[in-house]
Image (spheres, rainbow, N blue to C red):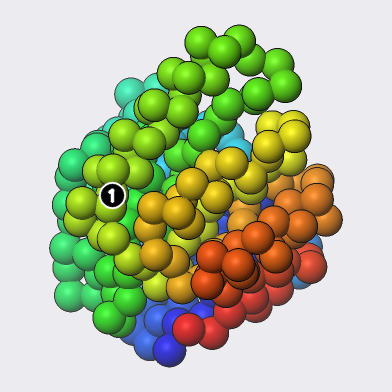
């Protein structure tokens, strides 16, 4: 059984029977759900950061303590290259194509249409994807036709790479960002059209949460369970 808690922005906390994974930590939830978990868990905690942007990587994770368990830091290579952290701060540094395995998890780093990588994770028999800043960032209301075409091509190329190895996933955490304008869910829609997805958790939407949640009906028409988010710190799924 896997529990998924929405923390903030693109950060989720995923707890399995044996470990805890925290993706793209920026800020804790108002109730301090990450802090509470760190204080009480006896499990291994993995902090995973997909790229250097401050809304996806907070260097505070390096010093966070797990008194009764242990901790591993998994960073995309650009975080080190951009001097947001030192190489010695990370247990694992990943670039596109890299694979990490241990007794609890397997991770493969795929590409992004922005900085860093996206993460495919296998744990407890489940396939779980965190997009980081992978999206069709087309900004169609503002971008030129040439810019839209290039982003469309770049995004679909990454999707093809993922589909070749993972045509179906149990859970995807993916941007649904109303700042993109009229077709704000284009990337998420194309993801669902390409990768069979059992559960979809939207992210990267604050402060336009209500608008992002309107994609739910369309996602459900694709046969996907859309995880509606009402507030930070909410347990949104048990898989």
Rendered position, 20 above or below 201: below
User: Which residue is depicted at the point 33% across and 24% down?
Assistant: 81
Residue 19 % position (x, y): 37, 77
Count of numbered badges drawn on the protein: 1
Task: Note whether residue 201 is visible.
Answer: yes
Rendered position, 138 above or below 211: above
Judged from this view, the residue extending furthest toward the front is 221
Given residues 117 and 72, the one toward you in this image is 117
User: Which residue is depicted at the point 46% across and 78% down?
Assistant: 15
Residue named by callout 1: 162
User: Which residue is depicted at the point 51% across and 10% down?
Assistant: 146
> Which element type, helix, strand or loop, lies under badge 1?
helix
Residue 90 % position (x, y): 30, 46
Given residues 117 and 215, the one toward you in this image is 215
User: Which residue is depicted at the point 59% across and 41% down?
Assistant: 186
Rendered position, 86 above or below 121: above
Say few, some or many: other residues with alpha carbon within 10 Å of mark 1 (under 14 / 14 to 19 / 20 or more): many
The N terminus lies in quadrant: bottom left
Residue 65 % position (x, y): 47, 63
Task: Note whether residue 115 is visible.
Answer: no
Residue 25 % position (x, y): 55, 52
Left or right of 200 in this view: 210? right
Left or right of 214 in this view: 221? left
């Amino acid at each position: 059984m896997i529990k998924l808690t929405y923390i903030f922005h693109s950060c989720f906390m995923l707890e399995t029977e044996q470990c805890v994974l925290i993706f793209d930590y920026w800020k804790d939830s108002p109730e301090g759900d990450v802090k509470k978990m760190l204080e009480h868990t006896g499990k291994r905690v993995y902090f995973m950061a997909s790229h250097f942007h401050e809304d996806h990587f907070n260097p505070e994770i390096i010093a966070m303590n797990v008194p009764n368990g242990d901790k591993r830091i998994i960073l995309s290579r650009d975080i080190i290259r951009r001097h947001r952290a030192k190489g010695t701060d990370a247990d694992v540094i990943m670039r596109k194509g890299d694979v990490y395995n241990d007794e609890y998890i397997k991770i493969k780093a795929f590409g992004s249409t922005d900085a860093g990588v996206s993460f495919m994770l296998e744990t407890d028999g489940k396939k779980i994807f965190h997009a980081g800043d992978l999206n069709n960032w087309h900004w169609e209301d503002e971008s030129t036709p040439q810019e839209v075409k290039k982003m469309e091509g770049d995004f679909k190329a990454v999707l093809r790479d993922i589909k070749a190895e993972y045509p179906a996933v149990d859970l995807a955490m993916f941007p649904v960002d109303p700042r993109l304008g009229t077709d704000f869910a284009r990337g998420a829609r194309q993801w669902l059209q390409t990768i069979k997805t059992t559960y979809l958790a939207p992210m990267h939407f604050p402060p336009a949460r209500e608008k992002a949640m309107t994609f739910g009906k369309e996602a459900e028409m694709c046969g996907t369970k859309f995880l509606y988010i009402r507030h930070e710190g909410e347990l949104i799924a048990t898989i």
